[in-house]
Amino acid sequence: RIEGKARLGSEARRRWVKLQGKDKFAPQPYAQLASVLNEMGHEVDARRILIAKQKDPARVKNLSIPRRVWHHILGGTIGYGYRPWQALVWIVLLIAMGTVAFWSGSDTALFAETKTTGVPAFNAFVYSVDAFVPLVDLYQAKYRLPIVPWLRVYLWFNISLGWTLTTLLVVGLTGLVRK
């Protein structure tokens, strides 16, 4: 327990744990502090300490460049597994961007219909969701493909980010990413 008049805030404790040195990374003080805070009922502060453990400069500097890039992606999208809801912010933002991009091509001949019968009316928002969210069929993306190169590239970008972010969201929600 942290007794007496000691400040419990995660910011003060994070500064305290970082005093261990800038060249060597030791995860144990972070884990111990998070465990104590969690047992005392300060779950939010414990989560902040665990995220700080992942962001520790001594930890990050020892990673290879590809692992460092992946590390930053995990931090920015799902908070290293401690804030998986952050991925929803990115998902909503990218679906909104897709809606604007696909809407700009909806009134012109920027799309080619892939089927001749039973083609539903075009809806840019539904098209963006259909292209972004994997394994969901809203009957938009399979009936139309962009003809214009920039819109087709954006569609591929949208699909690949959809697979990546929804997978990270699911993995983050299940707790498989936390270390």
Image (cartoon, rainbow, N blue to C red):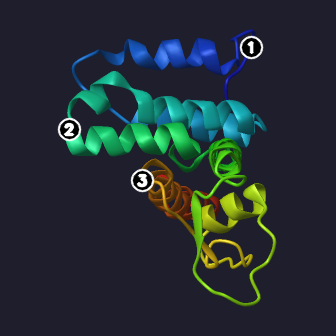
At horizontal 69% and vertical 43% (from top left) the residue drawn is: 100
Mark 1 nearby-residue class (10 Å; few <14, some 14–19, many ≥20): few
- Front one among 111 and 14: 111
Q: Amino acid at mark 2?
A: Ile
- x%, y% of residue 73? 43, 42
The mark that comes first in sequence, 2 or 3, is 2
Q: Residue furthest bottom?
A: 117
Mark 2 nearby-residue class (10 Å; few <14, some 14–19, many ≥20): few
Mark 3 lies on residue:
149
Asked which secondary structure carries label 3, the reply is helix
- x%, y% of residue 77? 54, 43
Mark 2 lies on residue:
65
At horizontal 74% and vertical 76% (from top left) the residue drawn is: 138
| Residue 25 visible at all | no
Q: Amino acid at mark 1?
A: Gly
Mark number, residue 4: 1
